[in-house]
Image (cartoon, rainbow, N blue to C red):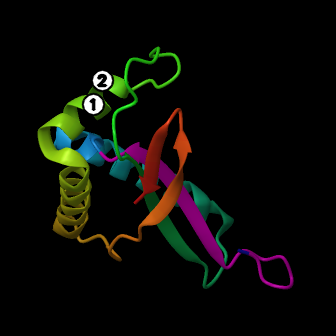
Amino acid sequence: MLDRDEVPRTLFEFKAIYSFDPIQHENGDLMALERDISKDLKGMRRWNVESVQYYGILLATHPLRAAGDLSPKIIKYQRQVAKSLQSFGADGVKERCVESVEKFLKGRGRGFDGHHLTRGDTYFGVDVEIL
């Protein structure tokens, strides 16, 4: 975000995962994401602007049901989505995702401002939410 003089005051770095990622891979993927976000935030600091605020934002796509038997070229991770939904149900996957991310970030002294659910859209007949 820029001020009226077009000087950066707030900088954001966004990363995206699927809601099953923290469940399937435990902390491995989250550690890689943390490294990526930290690296990108450090890169943003090169502008060396006084009083700029930096935020890393993690978005999780949360499918509410499996897509069925679509080509992996259409939905790349359909098998992992189906497996996690079968094991935990849509609400269980969501709860575990939020809990895993919160625990991971707080355990590393990182800020966690809860999760904010946004109703997504429907893709290939599958409703999704963004966590």
**Number of dots carrying numbers:** 2
Image coordinates of residue 3 in percent, x first then y, are: 78, 83
Residue pointed to by mark 1: 82
Task: Tell me which corner region of the image, top left, top right, bottom left or bottom right, holds residue 47.
Answer: bottom right
Question: Taking 31 as reference, is 40 left or right?
Answer: right
Kindly state the secondary structure of the residue where label 1 is placed.
helix
Q: Closer to the camera, 5 or 124?
A: 124
- The quadrant holding residue 96 is bottom left
Q: In the orientation shown, which residue stands out farthest toward the front?
A: 125
Amino acid identity at mark 1: Ala
Of 88 and 50, nearer the camera is 88
Asked if the residues shown at circle 2 and circle 1 are in contact, with their CB atoms under 8 angstroms apart, the answer is yes
Q: Residue at x 39, y 17 (%)?
A: 69
Q: CA distance from mark 2 to mark 1?
A: 5 Å
Q: Residues within 10 Å of mark 2 (few under 14, many from 20)?
A: some
Q: What residue is pinned by disc 2?
A: 79
Kindly identify the amino acid type of the residue bearing the numbered disc 2.
Answer: Arg
- In the picture, the disc for residue 65 is none
Q: Kindly indicate the quadrant of the structure image that contains residue 44.
A: bottom right
Q: Residue furthest left?
A: 87
The segment highlighted magenta reads 2-19
